[in-house]
Amino acid sequence: MGNYKDKPLSYIGRLSITCLVIICCAACGGNNKGEKAVDGDGQTDESLGSSSEYGAEIKPSSPKEDQSTTKYAKIVGWEEGQTPTAPVGYRVVKFADSLNSPRNIYVAPNGDILVAQARTEREGEDPKKVDSRNIFRSKSPNQILLFRDKDGDGIPEFREVFLSGLSQPYGMLVLGSHFYVANTDGLVRFPYQLGANKIDGKGEKIATLPAGGYNNHWTRNILANGDGSKIYISVGSGSNVGDNGMEHEIRRANILEVNPDGKEERIYAAGLRNPVGMDWEPGTGKLWTAVNERDELGDELVPDYITHVEENGFYGWPYTYWGKHIDPRWKGKVPDSLVKAAITPDYAVGAHTASLGFAFNKAPGFNAGAFIGQHGSWNRSGFSGYKIVFVPFKKGKPAGNPEDFLTGFIADESTNTVHGRPVAVVFTKKYMLVADDAANVIWAILPE
C-alpha cells in the first residue's frame, strides 16, 4: 500500500435459476478476464497476480474456515487538537463534532451539506462488538442534519436538524421538487424547495425495501442517473453467505433501479454482497460501487472491492467470490451456469477493510480517481482498513496501486484502540468531507 504522494442478486429469491442464468449470461461480456471455475482451495493460471488482496489482478488466498478471527476495536475518540493525518499539501479541519453516528453525507445542488445520523440496532450482540461501533451507546437518532459553509473554509456557519422521525436513514437525494431519503425499510420522498432549512411535511413512502440485514447491512444508498429518470438503490445481504436460506435474500445483495415515483422496479445488478458507496465515473459515465465482501474465510479472504456495475450483471454472491472462485460453503451446490456468469470485479481493496464510502474526486487540488472510506475490520487478527484509500484512475479505469490518503484512525493496535472509524466520503466544490461515525465527528480535508 503506497501513499498519496502527488497533490495536483440475490436473484434466486425472486427469479428461478433458469431466469438468473439467462440474465447473467447477457452480462458475460463484462470483466470476466477469461477465468475458469475455481474451487475455493485452488487457483487457475488465469487468476495469478502479484497480490492476494489489492489491485486489478489478484490471486486470492486459500480459504481458512478454521482460522476465522475476531478482533473488535475500542473507540477512544479524538483529543482536543488531534486530527487524522492527510498527505503534505492538505490540511484537516474539524467540520463538526458532538454528533451521534454521522453515517452518511450528501451535498445538495446548492451546496447544502446534509448528514444522516443512524446506527446499527441489534439485540443479543457481544457487548464488545456493540462498543466497537461508537464511543457511546445510544438508540439510533434517525435524523438528518443540515450544515452550510458559505465561505468554504471547512467550518460551517449554520447547523440545524433538517428532518427527523426516520427509520435508520442513509441515502439522500434532491431530485426535482422532492427530497428523497432511503430508510432501511423503504424509499421516502418529501415535498422540497432547494435551500429550505427544514422539512416538516409528511413523506410519501414510494417503495418498500427489505429492512435490516447481516451485521451493519441496514444501509440503503441512493443515486440518480444524469437525466433524473432513474434512481438506483443499494441493498445489502441479509446474511453472510446465504446462511438463512436464499428465500430470505429476496431483493437483497442487489442494486435496484426505480423510477422517481418508485415504480417499475427492477434488479439492475445482483450478487453484490453489500454495495454501499455509489458514484458515476466522470469520464465514462459508468456506475461504480464499493462492495463489502464476506467473512469467516480467514484473514485474507475475501477482499472488498470497487467495480463498475454492469447492467444485468451478476457478481457471484453468495456462491462465488472474485469472479469464479467457489465459496467452500457452497461447493457442490452451485450450477455451473451461475459460476460462469459471475463477473470479476475491477479492483480489490483489501479483505475485511469494510470499504463502504466511495466517491470520485469533484474538487480542485485532488488527484483524479476514487476515494474509498474503509470503516475497518473486526473479522481479522490484525486491524485492516481504518483509513481513506485513494485509487488513481485513467481513461475510466483504475491505473495504479492504492495509496493511503487519510490515516491516523488507529490509536494503538496492541490495545485494540482506535480514535474513530471513517465511513462516508464526499466532495463539496472546494474540499473533501469524511464522516467518522464512531467518534461522532466530520472532518474536512482542504488543499493548501
Image: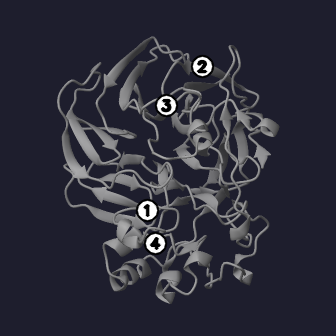
- Estimate the x, y position of residue 144 in percent, counting from the top left: 37, 28
- Estimate the x, y position of residue 366 in percent, counting from the top left: 63, 35
Judged left or right of residue 122, residue 5 is: right
- Estimate the x, y position of residue 427 in percent, counting from the top left: 51, 33
Q: Nearer the viewer, mark 3 or mark 1?
A: 3
- Residue at label 2? 94
Residue type at mark 3 is: Ser
- Residue at label 1? 253
Q: Is residue 277 above or below residue 397?
A: above
| Crowd around label 2: few <14 · some 14–19 · many ≥20 (10 Å) | some
Of residues 40 and 120, the one nearer the viewer is 120
Location of residue 41 (image quadrant):
bottom right
- Estimate the x, y position of residue 174 in percent, counting from the top left: 30, 36
- Residue at label 4? 314
Residue type at mark 1 is: Ala
Q: Secondary structure at mark 3?
A: loop
Judged left or right of residue 59, residue 168 is: left
Look at the image and tell me whether residue 280 can be seen: no
Circle number at residue 101: 3
Circle number at residue 213: none
Judged left or right of residue 431, residue 271 is: left
Residue type at mark 2 is: Lys
Of residues 444 and 399, the one nearer the viewer is 444
Judged left or right of residue 312, residue 411 is: right
Q: Nearer the viewer, mark 2 or mark 3?
A: 3
Residue at 47%, 69% in the rendered image: 242
